[in-house]
Amino acid sequence: MSIFILRYFNFLVKLIIIILLNKIYIEIYMEDINLRSKALYKEKFEKIRNLKVAIIGLGGVGSIIPISLVRSNVKSLLLIDKDKVELSNLNRQIGYDKNDINKYKGDVLKYKLSFLNDNLSINIKNEKIDENFDFNIFSSYDYIIDCIDDIKAKILLIKYSLKNNKKIISSLGMGKKYFPSKIEITTLNKTYNDRLAKKLRYELKKEEVDLKKVVVCFSSEITNENFDNNVIASSFFVPNSAGIMIASYLINDYLNIKE
């Protein structure tokens, strides 16, 4: 019996040592990952970990945003998208590869983000935004990022955000564009050359929404080419540039960093 107890005790000691070494390794690993970001943000860096962000739409613009935020020390995310990964997504949606086809986009991103940091709080909703959606889920989040194409869903998100004093950033039309340099972040009343923005302005005015309070990411690029309407004409560059700009804007706004 005494030999058994001794072996069990030795096993527990080894287990505790392994756990402690693993914890130390993770702390050193994360310290090394964050070294350059800490050098940039200085004392403000630790504040980022308290930020909670909801991202709706995990496609060309949306899939790069959680990746950017987690690499910037954001720990809490809500990812919403009803779609599964398709082969046609892979030319531009950076969060996915051929092994992810037919999997829900939110589930894939949550899994992949765990390899960057295993101390994350990520909630997933594989749902559509409509009148039946439970908008109360956003109550604990600081920012809402809208990266969906559905105009009705956009309006619902914007109206909810303004009514509940939530900061929202809406991405507008990034298809049929060539030049990332034409992307801007401004308020909806200042947009131009964007069909989705025009339609959104029209609908929100009918709802008596103040367009000056709606922050958007849009492209001012004019494309006169004729495209096949049966295919979403888009490449990697513009959508992902828009996503990075949105993530950067969010961090800078949260930390009150001005140009």
Image (tube, rainbow, N blue to C red):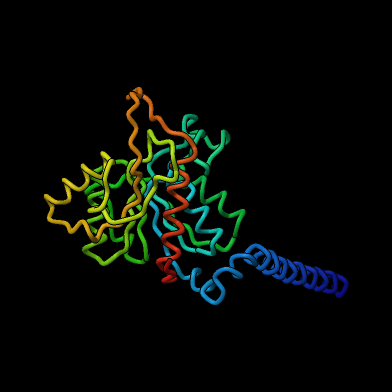
The percent position of residue 146, horizontal first and vertical second, equals 34, 51
Where 221 sits versus 12, above or below?
above
Task: Determine whether, in the image, residue 101 is placed left or right of residue 150.
Answer: right
Position of residue 105 measured from the top left corner of the image (x, y, whole percent): 46, 43
Q: Nearer the viewer, residue 15 or 106?
A: 106
Q: Quadrant of the C terminus?
A: bottom left
The structure residue drawn at horizontal position 24% and vertical position 61%, both measured from the top left corner, is 213
Kindly give the residue lying farthest to the bottom in the view shown.
Answer: 43
Q: Identify which residue, 181 or 248, lies in the foreground.
A: 181
| Side (left or right) of 203 relative to 50 | left
* Residue at (51, 74) in percent of width and height: 44
Q: Nearer the viewer, residue 170 or 105?
A: 170
Position of residue 220 measured from the top left corner of the image (x, y, whole percent): 33, 43
Looking at the image, is 41 positioned above or below residue 114?
A: below
Residue under the image location 59 percent in, 70 percent down? 38
Left or right, 216 with respect to 180, comes to left
- Quadrant occupied by the N terminus: bottom right
Q: Give the residue at x 50% y 63%.
A: 74
